[in-house]
Amino acid sequence: MLRIISKSASFSRTNTSSSSWRQVVLNQHQHNFQHHRPFFWGASSGSGSDNNNNDDKKKDKGDKVKEQKDNETNKKNDDAKEDPAPSSISVEDDPSSSNKSDSNNKKKGGSSSSLILPSRLGHGDESPRYPHLIGLPVISRPLFPGIITSVTLSDSATIDALEKLTSNTQHSNGYVGVFLRKDSPSGMSDGGVILDTPEVITDASTNPLYKVGTFAQIHRLARGTVGVGPSGLHTRNRFGGKAVTTNLGSTASDATKLSSSDDDESDDEDEDKTATLLLLAHRRIDLTSIDSVGPPIDVTVSHWDRLDYNFKGGVDDTIRALTNEILSTIREIATLNSLFREHISFFPTRIDANDPYRLADFAASITTGTPEELQAVLEERDAEMRLHKALVLLSKEREVSKLQQEIQAKVEEKMTEAQRKYFLTEQLKSIKKELGMEKDDKEALIQKYRKKLKTYSKDAISQEVMETIDSEIEKLSTLEKNSSEFNVTRSYLDWLTNIPWGIFSKENFDIRDARKVLDRDHYGLDEVKDTILQFIAVGKLKGTVQGKILCLAGPPGTGKTSIGKSVADALGRKFYRFSVGGLSDVSEIKGHRRTYVGAMPGKLIQCLKSIGTSNPLVLIDEIDKLGRDHRGDPSSALLEVLDPSQNSMFRDHFLDVPVDLSQVLFMCTANDLERIPGPLLDRMEVIRLSGYDVPEKLAIAEQYLVPKAMRENGILSKQEKEEEEEEVEDSDIKQEENETSKHDSDLYTRTKGVPESLSIEKSALESLVRWYCREAGVRNLSKHIDKIVRKLALQIVAEDEGAELTEKSARKSNTWSVTDSNLNEYVGKPIFTSDRMYEKDPLPHGIVMGLAWTSMGGSALYIETQSIKRGVDSDGKRRGGGMLKVTGQLGKVMEESTQISYTVARARLAEIDEKNTYYDDNDIHMHVPEGATPKDGPSAGITMVTAMLSLALDKPIRNDLAMTGEISLTGKVLPVGGIKEKTMAARRAGIKCLIFPAANKRDYDELPDYLKDGLEVHFADDYSTVREVAFGS
């Protein structure tokens, strides 16, 4: 049984469980309490309606009349009774009896004989004081007394409990205890994760809530969202597919009905998983204990008594000063920040300045302080300290408002200045147009195009091109500036008028000057240089150099790309390079159609526009690496470009007019000619660049690479000219530069602090070429020289500063000269230690050295064979027949060559010795070393035959013999390629005797004499010649 003391409105539990008590509280909410209007400081109780509808006004008038009658009746009853109320009221625990009593009371129209119902609940400090409440944790900011606010809930159990509490109450009243979370006041966990259900706690032992909270009344609970409009706070629910707005004057049951209707119509939409709780705070409460973490949370609280400040004997100066400062600060912030001023407009304008407690609460509630700062104001009991803490928050708000105003002023200033310039510019355009000083943009464009066309000669532009330009200009004059077609036409005319029609650069027909330019930048490459000089000689006789298509093919690092710039300088032409490696879009060559957005011409038209002449030198790099996919085949598009008989009428897809490319000199580079399509290769004049040999690499390193590395790494610096030299006339300076252009190193001197003895000796360069950089080109050699010079620079600076270096970087020798003896200190141990796998002479049986060509140059390649004796069966006969096994990662062509060689070897063995059954008694295993390297080609045919005959005849081969050549099935020796590279590889391996196909004698005769000195070379057209040289007669 529960005893309720009516005067003090306090409760005590005796012999009643917690669940029974909660049921009684719910029943009491259902029967006893009336709904009350939102409370604001200084405001009258009012009707509680926020709408201006006539129906609401009539309803408010009826409520007022009924309220007045109830007050008069209560007053008469109070005067008539000596005892205003019984000391206690008995409430049965059985809810059925309570319900019967309630129904009887409704039928009679009066109150129950065992219950006294108050006519109206109080608000603020007059509200009831329940010791047990549903606890509601909040984030971001606490709730201050007298403030109405909304809280969004996302926990379904808490929503259901609160909804049951409000729906079971007769006049939509329910009370909760609102506490700020201590563990995550900002709504973020320690790991930065947003709390999904901030109203739920899991462990009460960690004190997750602040001890001081607010006793708040539920004004409305609505599933869905809550919005704030200019007229006040309202809830929005989805009803019948439309947004329905309910004002604050409506009861909570109306909102619940709307929310219930929404659930039926929307089939439990996701937004119904949350709810908005409209709360009116009454007083502060202390959290005594958390009885259950729920959800919902069950808490025991103690209520604060009303704190009234009474001025004793006059005005308290400190309190008054703080009050005035708060009011002044609020006014100042309202003038600075329009959003703050609009926020204050939701609260009443009359604030009781004589109540410092409520003034501090109001001031803190309108600020944007941190949760901890606002909670400190809520917990403060002293009036002066509460005012002081609220003033600190207002001061911070004022500083933020000032900063915001400064930022806004700067932005407005910039916008104002930009608008001012815009208006003045438009006025200036109008004035100039009226005075005839300036025409509109369209006329100016047309005049620009006409003026550009006058710079070209009459015969330079064909009639078809001129008609196209005129028609496009006429169309441009009829189009609106803002139309998309206008921009397309404008872009088209820009390209048509900027192509250098009939403009050619002056060409150089002096062979001596051209030779100087070519020799200045490149060593060797005599065939390329001779071809360029031939073009110049023909041009001098004819008066012009016709466009040609040259293709430089060779290994990487041999100077194919860099020679293009030198050729352009020698001819006096402009230079343009673009790479087609991996290119698979035909539009890059022939352009896009103008119907596409962002369409542009191809690379060749872009070249003519950027260069400004119609006879440039165009270098098409990596032409052997063209791609091909669904966007087309660029190699087929290049057929028209690189055909001298067709490129005089080249049509780009974008321009769609003929452009003459016949005067353009095209140069292409490639590493492997086999990857270039046959029709495209047929249109080129191929110049093969073989790899550099040792003398050429040494000369390139001494004359070009070492000085270049020292200049780039600061060892050498430009000479400073004396004042007298600055007074020399320009013509004398140009003449001096031309005389010294051949030797650029003469213009440089050693940088201050660099030892005079610093140098890279020839012996070091020889060791680099032989043991570190054996590739055909000089790119790797250049990298090693740069590494040496960089380490020398580090040692110079370190010794000058006295800094310590690691053992690997420190200078170990006493000299600054780099020789073959100390070369490993700068570039490490040699990569190659020997050119031969077998040093002894003669070689083991079945092993012969061959010569191979790779993209990196020539190399020595051993062919190894080994016999495997067959087993015998029970009758003593050999099992199986002759079999050849091949290993070494050989390609398909080379595998076929092994089969041919095996057949030739068996046939030759029968000619030499008919009784020899070696191949019948043994299987042969052939292997080509360096199995990780793919190998292919037929040039090892005679080497394979010789190795297998060496096994069968039991005769070794001399170790200074190497050979190359393709073998036919009948024993004919067929020609192969790469004779120069293979000869260089043989010399590097110390080979003295070579066997080449007879058809390659002309290639060998073209080699320099220094490559042929000391070599014994035999040319064979049949294998019999090879056998005589290898095995003797």
Image (cartoon, rainbow, N blue to C red):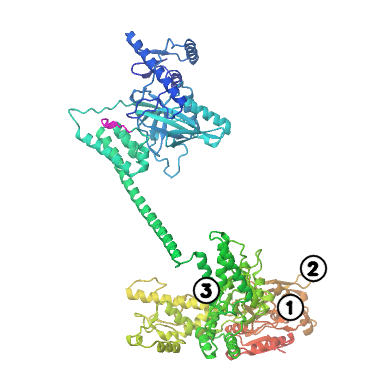
The numbered dot on residue 679 is: none
Label 3: how many Cα within 10 Å (few below 14, some 14–19, many 20+): few
Q: Which residue is mark 1?
A: 901
Label 2: how many Cα within 10 Å (few below 14, some 14–19, many 20+): few
Residue 348's image quarter? top left
The mark nearer the N terminus, 1 or 2, is: 2
- Where's residue 695, x and y in %? 53, 86
Q: Magenta residues?
A: 349-357
Q: CA distance from mark 3 to mark 2?
A: 100 Å
- The answer to whether residue 811 shows anywhere in this view is no
Q: Which residue is mark 3?
A: 451
The mark nearer the N terminus, 1 or 3, is: 3
Q: CA distance from mark 1 to mark 2?
A: 30 Å
> Where's the C terminus, which quadrant?
bottom right
Q: Which residue is mark 2?
A: 873
- Where's residue 806, x and y in %? 39, 70
Residue farthest toward the left in the current orientation of the protein: 313
Q: Amino acid at mark 2?
A: Asp
> Going by the image, does 303 lie left or right of 977?
left
Name the residue: 56% across, 74% down: 499
Residue 178's image quarter? top left
Residue farthest toward the right in the current orientation of the protein: 875
